[in-house]
Amino acid sequence: MSSLVPTMRHVRGFDVARPLSIGVLVIMMLPLVFLPLASIFIFGTSKGLASFWAALMAPEAVFALKLSMVTSFWATLFNVFFGLFAAYVLSRYNFWGRNALIVTISLPTAIPTAVAGFALLLLWGPYGLLGRFLAPNGIQTMFTAGAIILANIFVTFPLAFGVIKPVFDTMSRSLEEASATIGATRVQTFWHVTLPSLRGAIVSGALLTFARAVGEFGSTILVSGNLAGRTQTAPLYIFAKFNEGQIEAANAIAIVLALFSFLIFSVLFFARDWLDVD
Amino acid sequence: MRKGATKTVAGPCLITLASLVLLFSSCLPTPPSESGGINLTVYGFSIMKEALEKSVYPGFSAKWKAEHGQEVHFTSSFAGSETVTNQILAGVKADIAILSIERDVTRLKDAGFVVADWQAFPQKGIINQTPFVILVARGNPKAIQDFPDLAKPGVRVIHPDPVSSGGAQWSILAIYGSELVKSAQESGEPDSARALQTVQAIWRNVKSTPGSAREARTQFELGYGDALVTYELEGLLMKQAGANVEVVVPRSTIFSEHPAVVIDRNVDATRRPLVEAFLRYLWSEDAQRAFVQYHFRSVTDESLNEAKPQLAKIELPFRIDYFGGWQRAYPEIIEKIFRDQVQRRK
């Protein structure tokens, strides 16, 4: 990826469109993104850093952050492997129903997350299609960390796939063919030739999935049970604290999540050059 | 791509990934409360939080420890009463539910979650009570004195959503019933047309319907409305916290009565003694004192309520019995009057 930004030179002398358009862009973003984010920081730290730190270190807050990270990690791990596998199958083989599968994988993008939540409840809940057979055996999936992972997997299902598949599609197959002609097995070719050129896509797919999972709210509020210190993720903690009127406590965690996504997207942005080697 | 480069990257990548997996697999965080001892899970309606967490839980834990030597920990979740009930119906492993409205106990009973006769406990299963009042900004800028004033033009009312909140249903019953009681006092005959008109007119001024009484209070605190109909204790808690509010006591209003029940389906024989001991503790002198301290009113000891001057005197109070109990109030007022004639014609 080139780091040079091509500049247009259609005008002689000072190009007034340049500062003007940058200014308009920033002014547009001000009330839409910058100021809402700024108010989180302002309110979160309004009572001083000591109370911000105390809010952050509350055992239930720490638990909520950890739970979010762990459940998102497992959902990411699954979805990256799944996305890689699905992208491989769906771009290498042409078969009846292939397009239907591609469309289905993409569906969770547009399904409201609340629907994802109660769809899981309808399947795994005590009266659900599968849940009704599991419940009598003492197996409970809903209202556990497992339910949060399932919900995260559902809502982030298309993300890694969506990043990896286009790379597969446009990948030159001549390298793989060359690898095959010198006697490499399928696995060797995949490991040494295909996978390295997917490195960038895998990392960005994983980061996107993880970021999205950490922020997931609509489905987890339904399937987790929302027990503080037990099944309450960071976004649920924020919601609960906000509803209780403890705005500072809610803001402290909101700041952490905001910084966290800033970090993830910075990594995505700056690591791209390093990762996209080909 | 150079072959050597691939190798050097793939190796460390794999090792990092594997160690991360190992790191995280042992890493589902342990709940802060789960360090030995037994756990009790309580699902409560939104405004129970302070009294339970700050006073009732520690009180019971200390008592149980003294008597049985075991550590008891509490885990709880608070939301609108209907939401809590739906969560339990969907399968959350609650041991005890403390609900705003008896109708929710009936729903749990109908679905087989509550089997035993819950009204066999003291006070027919009701643990505390509180009247419904109006909260306004300090100085009462819109001059609101009673429920009908909420219908005045330009008054922005925040009212929780009766679909998810028990408090919202109490509030509707409070407004509707108070008009019946007042008209009966004035003319000898309860005027249901007047009551309906008042509810309809107030709902034209409702600007927001949050999910629970506590959410409604947060919105009100953030300055979104001129008036909020809610439990008296919410107003007193806000005043205590130094918020810019004033409590307006209507001439006639309802006392909400809050039931607590064991979720029989989730409680096995070994844990039942503990769960029932906790439930009974809610009617103990200590717990009732704690409720009054957090501005509820005691159901067992009227002298506790009288000893607290902040609790308002209501001129014409009434209870759910006035409507013939929840089994009639819900279908006849919340459904036939509110849902069919207020909400759908708004």
Image: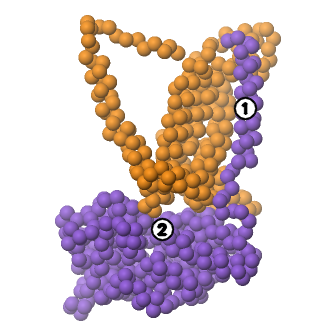
Q: Residue at x 50, y 52 (%)?
A: A50
The residue indicated by pointer 1 is B16
3D distance between C-alphas at marks 2 and 1: 45 Å
B275 and A31: which is toward the camera: A31
Residue A182 in percent (x, y) is at 79, 8
User: Which chain is depicted purple?
Assistant: B
Up/down of B310 relative to B234, above or below? below
Q: Are marks 2 and 1 on the same chain?
A: yes
Name the residue furthest left. Answer: B153
User: Which chain is depicted orange?
Assistant: A
> Which chain is disc 2 placed on?
B
Element on which disc 2 rests: helix
Q: Amino acid at mark 1?
A: Thr
Q: Quadrant of the N terminus of chain B?
A: top right
Q: Residue at x 50, y 40 (%)?
A: A259
Count neighbours of disc 2 (C-alpha within 10 A) and say few if under 14, some if 14 to 19, many if 20 or more.
many
The residue indicated by pointer 2 is B46
B311 and B268: which is toward the camera: B311
